[in-house]
Image: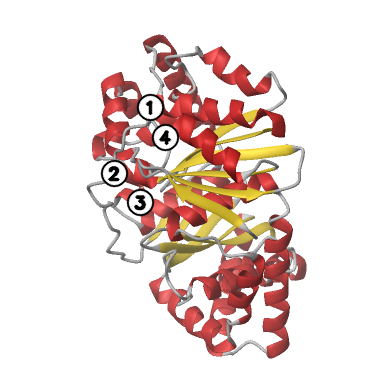
């Protein structure tokens, strides 16, 4: 992977990977998300992600959406706990059009009152829809349990009460504090020269006033295991069990990714899928997840099952945890797990729409991007002792929290 990069005078970093394709992809990643909100700003990062599409100094909402869609392209955005991202896909001849519209919505949005009022109601409906889906809602509530009374534990959407209180002044204040130029990465994958990328990004981002981050992000520093059972009118019992894990910079992260993939990754042959679904028929869906944040991480196992099978599932999962803690993996087992994980990563890298965001996020966090050869080296370096050590630290049932909807 031969990517090229440079930094504008205002601190915005640029990374580009040349790809022989008729379709180009680019985006802007801002190192600001829900965890950067103050108490009175709950839901603000996500709200701004919606609001930037509602009008700029140059365009009304309709013209923003039409700018790329008129030529068959796409523009979209998302907010996470630590980042806000706007991304585009388009025919390669429309590179300048895509870069210009990203710059316009991020730096020239005017937040028209009528549009903002309407969008608040749209997001409130999104919140209501989310509450109707316990298999989605439980993940956010579990993070609230793990990161209790901490910014990282707040859900991304906010509440209807908070949303209705936001003003244009509040929006502009949040942007001024948190949309810092030295915490932005413009990422690109497509059939365009790096010289042209530098010229276009200088044209549309180079004149933005420097706004470096002054105040560091609040750190997550305490955790007390807790079990919480919530009564809900659901057909299934939904359960998440998990623990704090390693941050994005921890040397144990790769081994944690491997362990997570073995336990409940996307493959139907994961250990928990084979155990709960294939062998016993207790669950239609079971998965494990590991999220590495800048200063901490979280590991969890989720499953949904009939109420009468809930205790059986918990018993089996705990038994699997204990097995990984007390018995080392065989050499063949580990080799198979490594090959599966690397295969998934390699196949995923063929999707340029996903690759461009992976490039940007890696460059944001580490100021570098590992090629597939380096990724493979890191995976191959994991030993059975590494896996067992991590299992003993993360899969200790006495340190785990649990959230149950029943």
Q: Name the residue under label 3.
A: 152
Q: Is mark 4 on a helix, strand or loop?
A: loop
In the rendered image, which residue does mark 4 sit on? 206
Residue at the extreme top: 114
- Counting residues from the N terminus, which is met first, the one under dot 1 or under dot 2? 1
SS at circle 2: loop
Q: In this view, does 88 lie to the left or right of 48?
A: right
The residue at which mark 2 appears reads as 212
Task: Tell me which residue sits at (59%, 87%) in the image.
Answer: 384
Q: Which of marks 1 and 3 is in front?
A: 3
Residue 284 position, x and y percent, is: 71, 56
Residue 289 location, quadrant: bottom right
230 up-or-down from 87: above or below:
below
Q: Which residue is nearer to you in this view: 381 or 307? A: 381
10 Å crowding of disc 3: few (<14), some (14-19), many (20+): many
CA separation, marks 4 and 2? 14 Å
Residue 396 screen position, x and y as percent: 45, 77
Task: Report which residue position mark 1 lands on.
Answer: 160
The numbered mark, 3 or 2, whose residue comes first in the sequence reads 3
Q: Which of marks 4 and 2 is nearer the N terminus?
A: 4
Q: Distance between the residues labelled 1 and 3?
A: 20 Å
Label 1 – label 2 distance at C-alpha: 32 Å
Quarter of the N terminus within the rendering: bottom right
């Amino acid at each position: 992977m031969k990517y090229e990069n440079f930094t504008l005078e205002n601190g915005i970093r640029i990374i580009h990977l040349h790809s022989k394709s008729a379709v180009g992809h680019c985006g802007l990643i801002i190192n600001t998300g829900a965890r950067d909100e103050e108490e009175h700003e709950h839901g603000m990062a996500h709200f701004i992600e919606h609001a930037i599409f509602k009008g700029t100094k140059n365009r009304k909402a309709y013209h923003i959406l039409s700018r790329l869609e008129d030529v068959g392209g796409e523009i979209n955005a998302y907010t996470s706990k630590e980042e806000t991202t706007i991304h585009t896909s388009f025919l390669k001849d429309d590179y300048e059009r895509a870069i210009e519209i990203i710059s316009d919505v991020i730096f020239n949005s005017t937040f028209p009152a009528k549009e903002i009022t309407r969008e608040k109601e749209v997001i409130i409906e999104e919140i209501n829809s989310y509450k109707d889906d316990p298999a989605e809602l439980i993940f956010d509530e579990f993070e609230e349990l793990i990161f209790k009374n901490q910014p990282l534990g707040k859900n991304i959407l906010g509440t209807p009460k908070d949303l209705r209180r936001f003003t244009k002044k509040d929006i502009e204040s949040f942007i001024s504090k948190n949309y810092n130029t030295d915490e932005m990465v413009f990422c690109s994958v497509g059939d365009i020269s790096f010289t042209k990328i530098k010229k276009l990004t200088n044209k549309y981002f180079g004149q933005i006033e420097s706004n470096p981050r002054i105040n560091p992000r609040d750190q997550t520093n305490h955790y007390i295991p807790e079990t919480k059972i919530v009564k809900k009118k659901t057909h299934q019992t939904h359960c998440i069990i998990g623990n704090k894990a390693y941050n994005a910079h921890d040397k144990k992260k790769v081994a944690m990714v491997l362990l997570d993939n073995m336990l409940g990754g996307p493959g139907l042959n994961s250990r928990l899928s084979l155990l709960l679904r294939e062998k016993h028929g207790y669950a239609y869906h079971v998965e494990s997840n590991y999220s590495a944040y800048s200063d901490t991480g979280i590991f969890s196992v989720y499953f949904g099952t009939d109420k009468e099978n809930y205790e059986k599932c918990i018993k089996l999962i705990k038994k699997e945890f204990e097995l990984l803690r007390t018995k080392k993996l065989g050499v063949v087992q580990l080799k198979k797990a490594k090959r599966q994980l690397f295969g998934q990563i390699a196949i995923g890298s063929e999707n340029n729409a996903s690759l461009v965001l992976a490039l940007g996020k890696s460059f944001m966090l580490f100021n570098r991007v590992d090629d597939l050869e380096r990724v493979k080296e890191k995976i191959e370096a994991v030993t059975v002792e590494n896996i067992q050590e991590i299992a003993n630290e993360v899969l200790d049932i006495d340190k785990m929290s649990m959230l149950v909807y029943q």
